[in-house]
Every structure is written in structure tokens, then in C-alpha cells.
Image (spheres, helix red, strand yellow):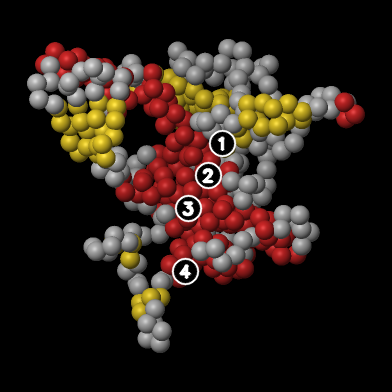
Amino acid sequence: MMNVLLHHFSHATSPSPFITKYQAKDSPHYLEVTSNESGRIEKIQLSDGFPKEQLEQLEQRIKDALLTTDQQVGADVLFCRERVAGHLRYKDLFQVTPVPNGAPLPEVGFRDYPFLLQFKYTKSSDGMIDYSRRREKAIIYTRLLNLLLNQRVRLLRNNAQAYWTLNVSEPPAKMSSSYRQEGYTFEGLSLIPKDFTDTSDIDEIETVPFQKYYTSKGVTSDPLKIPDNIEHSLDRIFSLSLQDYDRLSRACTWYEKGQLIWEESASASFVAMVSAIESLIGEKTPCKRCGQDVPESLLICEECKQPRYQSTKNFKEFITKYVSDLGSMPKEAALLYTIRSSLAHGAKLLQQDLRPWSFMNPAHQNESQIQGNLFHITGIAIYNWLWSRKIS
């Protein structure tokens, strides 16, 4: 909506944080939009004498850009640590296929294999809105695949990043560096194809019984395999209540971010993973006066008169309920929330961040093991929570 208004008027100002005034240059007429803190439009006000013909033009432009229901196929390139050799189709919503022969593939390092994600979305005549809708679907399906597959799946960032890279194809003595922008493409790649790629000559991705798939912690496969119930899991996701779908979306987002930032900060990644689980633990009631969330089980200590929060207890109960193999990781069950609280409140940092040069330190190795298990615990907890929900 805001994008359409800006294109129409070509100029906007913000008299206050939640009010945007749209007004064409040298025109006395304007349109003022008032939004709430979440960005939702609450009121639209026109200046006195706003031209009727201009209002009709604006209404038509909004209808063309926002209210169409025409479907279009969009596409994006995703990356996975395991090679995608087959295809996966979920109803008429999206499909996964390998990149075509001749497309660039990784040669060294911790490999990021490219593959194609194609999906249906509601197109728009406005270029920015059309791009946003395509990006929305790509991000949502990436996060869901990242949860349901046993390999990290990622989408390139929206803002282009550049890095110093080594030209490893050169002999070591002549090796050089280049400053290059992150990105991936190949000849013939279209982000708005006419239709889904024909997969009649591409085998389906091999499936594995889901019980085995989700209990094979740390085991990788090449090429990528998928659980045999992935379609049923997706059915459940899209049948959740709005409240549960929102909670799952937050959990999947934290889970994805925790994986992506691990190499940058183990401590931040740890907090993100625990936050992913917290996204699913009940609903808190906000205080009517200050707006802060107040746990229902808040107690006051009789000795020091300080609040005693039951967050740790609720967290342990949640992962005990939804992670069946938690008994094999007793250390993690006891320490996860305690470590998270210390990290979030600045009381400590993981050794991987504080002393990254001391990677042979026993404390460093112990933390690495706990964090590796936390990735497993978080993914399984979200997955099992999903399957515990009542669906409409």
C-alpha cells in the first residue's frame, strides 16, 4: 500500500513516527496515513478539496497493484550442504529441483550446493510489490524446508554482500585474492518462469522412513534425502490455527537465524536456538500497566521478596515432553536454559566467541558438544510440537 502511494505521489514526509503524508510536488493536496506500532494502517485522511479524478486514479492503481488474484510462478536459488539430485513437488504450491547441467557447482570447502525452488505467488503490476511477494514465498518455504530436512537450507540475503575471496584455481605460489559480491546465477536462470520446470525426466528425491530420518543425529547423506512424511508435515503446517502458525513461524525464524549466525557468534546462535523453543511455550499475559509479559506462574520469594520466574522449569518440561531422546543428553537438559540466561544477560560468553584461538580447550570442546546437541534438540522439539497440535 505505502509503495503504491509513494509511486503515485512521488514524495512523502513523516510529521510523526506513525503518520506518513503523501503529497505531489507543487500540489496543495495530500493524503495522510496513520499506522499503529505494528505497521497496520488505522486511518487514511484526505486534504480538503482532494480532486475526485485523482482519487479515482489512485483507487484503480491500488486495485491493480494489490487486489489482483492472478497467480504467477516465481523462483529462487537455495543452498544446501548436500547435493540435490531429484525433485520434490508439494501440491501446486512449490517444487524443488536440481540446477541444470552446466550450472556452477562448489569445488572446495564446506560445500553449499545450489538447487532451485519454484513456487506460486500472487503477482502484482507494481514491480516492488511483486518482488516483495516473491521474496515472501521464497523465505517462508526456505524456513519450512530448513525445519523439515536434516540439512541446513539457506537463501541468499536480500542485501548484497561482498567478501575477499581466494582464487583457488591458481597454483599456491601464485594464488591471489579478489573482492567479490556474493551471488549465484547461470545461463537461462529466470526468477519468473512461465511455469514449473518439467520434472518428467528427473527422479523424485529418495525418501527415508521419518522415524529413522529424524533420529539419525549428525548423519549426512549424499545426495540429499527427505523424510517419507514431509508432505503430511507440510499439510499440518498449512492447517494450523492462525495462532499456532504464528508461533511456528517465529520458532522457524529463530531456528534458521541460529544456524546462520553460528560461525559468527556461537553465543548469539545459542540464544537464538533457545528462543526458538521459547516461541512455542505457552502464551504470557501482558501487564495492563507496563505491557511486559508476566508468566502465569510468577512467584515472590518469601525471603528476598524478589520475583521467581518459572521459565527454566517450563523450558525443561517442554523439551522433556517433545524430545524423546533427551535422556541421552542429560547434561544439555540441565544446562541449556541456564547457559542461555547467562548469555542473554551478559553474564558470560561461550569460549568459541571469547577465546576463539583456544579451540583445543576442554571448556571450548564441551560447549561445542552442547551446542551441536542444541541444534538437534531445537529441530526435534519444533517438529514434535507441530505434530502435537490440533489442526482445522
**Precedes in sequence: disc 1 or disc 3:** 1
Could one spot residue 71 in this view of the protein?
Answer: no
- In what element is the residue under mark 2? helix
Q: Which residue is mark 1?
A: 154
> Could you tell me residue 168's position as x and y percent?
80, 28
Disc 3 or 2, which lies upstream in sequence? 2
Crowd band around label 1 with a 10 angstrom C-alpha radius: few (<14), some (14–19), many (20+): many
In the drawing, what numbered circle is on residue 31? none
Image x and y of residue 206, in percent: 60, 33
3D distance between C-alphas at marks 3 and 4? 15 Å
Nearer to the camera, 207 or 280: 280
Circle 2 residue: 256
Instruction: Point out the tag, 4 or 2, that comes first from the N-terminus.
Output: 2
Crowd around label 2: few <14 · some 14–19 · many ≥20 (10 Å) = many
**Residues at discs 4 and 2 in contact (Cβ within 8 Å):** no
- Does dot 3 land on a helix, a strand or a loop? helix
Distance from Cα at disc 3 to Cα at disc 2: 9 Å
The alpha-carbon separation of the residues under discs 1 and 2 comes to 8 Å
Left or right for 108, reference 143: right
Mark 4 → mark 1, Cα distance in angstroms: 31 Å
Mark 4 / mark 1, whichever is N-terminal: 1
Q: Residue furthest right?
A: 173
State whether residue 331 is above or below residue 25. Answer: below
**Mark closest to the chain's N terminus, 3 or 4:** 3
Image x and y of residue 179, in percent: 69, 27
Q: Looking at numbered disc 4 in the image, what kind of residue is underneath it?
A: Thr
The spot of residue 387 in percent (x, y) is 43, 50
- The amino acid type, in three-letter code, at marker 3 is Ala
